[in-house]
Image: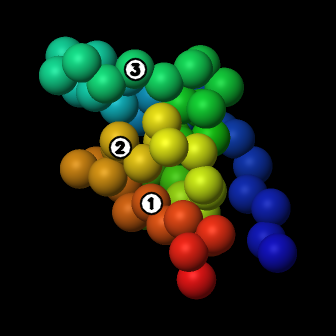
Amino acid sequence: MESLPWIPEFALSYAILRQTSESIGITCGTLDLLIATHAYATKRTLVTNDRALHQLKPWLDVQDWTTR
């Protein structure tokens, strides 16, 4: 598994994702959203079974690893 670094430019992606999702009533914990931001900013798929993160599907490819 490849491990990607967190870079300062992701801060803007975090702000965009948080503001956009919260504006329509979707809230996630800070650390959960940081993980989602990493996938969003690098255009990767987020693999999780965390239901809260599945709400971010309008902006992010989210797959549930428990359903495969």
- What's the distance in space between the residues labelled 2 and 3, CA to CA? 9 Å
Q: Are marks 1 and 2 in contact (CB under 8 Å)?
A: yes
Q: Is residue 24 left or right of residue 21?
A: left
Q: Which residue is mark 1?
A: 62
Query: Residue 63, how many percent across, how many down?
Result: 49, 67
| N-term mark: 2 or 3 | 3
Query: Residue 24, how many percent across, how many down?
Result: 17, 22
Q: Is residue 29 visible?
A: yes
42 is higher (above) or lower (below) than 29: below
- What's the distance in space between the residues labelled 3 and 1, CA to CA? 16 Å
Q: Which residue is mark 3?
A: 27
Q: Residue furthest toward the left?
A: 24
Query: Residue 9, how many percent across, how many down?
Result: 52, 34
Q: Is residue 52 left or right of residue 59?
A: right
Q: Which residue is mark 2?
A: 56
Give amino acid for label 3: Thr
Give the secondary structure at mark 2. loop
Near-viewer residue (37 or 30) = 30
Quadrant of the rendered image containing residue 60: bottom left
Residue at 58% from the left image edge and 83% from the top image edge: 68
Give the secondary structure at mark 3. loop
Q: How is the image coloured?
A: rainbow
Q: Judge the density around disc 1: few (<14), some (14-19), many (≥20) Cα neighbours within 10 Å.
A: many
